Image (spheres, rainbow, N blue to C red):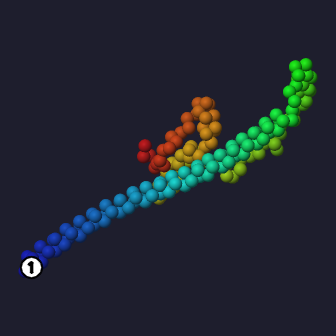
Amino acid sequence: MEWCTSRNNINLKQEVEDLKMDLKKSKENLGKSEINLSNAKTDIRNLKEENDVLRNNLKEYQTALDQCEIATDIYRKTSPMPSPRDSSKLDRKRMSTKRKKINKKDISGPTHDTVVHVSGAKMVDSKLTIIDNTGLLDPRVRKFLALAGINGGASGEQPREVGSD
């Protein structure tokens, strides 16, 4: 009888150890899932911000295009074509008009909704994660940086933990 009880105790201890190992693996998988969920939420937030920026840019470009078309139509309707002999008078007139100098007050700073932190790092689940928002940059800015020889970074990369290269 004692032999059966000790055998049952050994079996129960082995089962407890197996359950502890399963619990440890489950906790590790849960931690990885939480990190993946956090990264997915960051990606969704970045995509929503990029979508908003692109929609606003599209509205601005469409408004500017409409204004240009209206101005072109008005100019065509109201201004007669100058004759060749009048062109020298127009050139002198253009040369004589002085242009207003630009001062610091004429140049506005960035507004809160147009500032984009291109890259940086933030804490996610007690780990430092590198964030890359180059996808949020205006395409004209990206083109300008490319012309200047500045690499746009690793656009499209997933956020990653520091040191996980």
126 or 116, which lies in front? Answer: 116
Q: Is residue 37 left or right of residue 80?
A: left
Q: Is residue 33 above or below residue 65?
A: below
Q: Residue furthest front?
A: 77
Residue that appears at 88% across and 25% down: 82
Q: Position of residue 156 (x, y in %)?
A: 50, 44
Residue that appears at 54% across and 51% down: 47
Q: Is residue 97 above or below residue 44?
A: above
Q: Position of residue 86 (x, y in %)?
A: 91, 22
Q: Is residue 61 left or right of residue 8?
A: right
Residue that appears at 48% across and 49% down: 159
Residue 55 visible to the viewer: yes
69 or 92, which lies in front? Answer: 69
Number of numbered discs visible in the structure rendering:
1
Q: Position of residue 51 (x, y in %)?
A: 58, 50
Residue 88 visible to the viewer: no
Q: In the structure shown, which secondary structural element does the residue marked by tag 1 occupy?
A: helix
Residue that appears at 78% across and 36% down: 72
Question: Mark 1 = which residue?
Answer: 2
39 or 79, which lies in front? Answer: 79
- Quadrant where the N terminus sits is bottom left
Q: Is residue 66 left or right of residue 123?
A: right
Q: Is residue 66 left or right of residue 90?
A: left
Label 1: few (<14), some (14–19) or many (≥20) C-alpha neighbours in 10 Å: few
Q: Position of residue 102 (x, y in %)?
A: 83, 37
- Quadrant where the C terminus sits is top left
13 or 45, which lies in front? Answer: 45
* Amino acid under disc 1: Glu
Q: Quadrant of residue 67?
A: top right
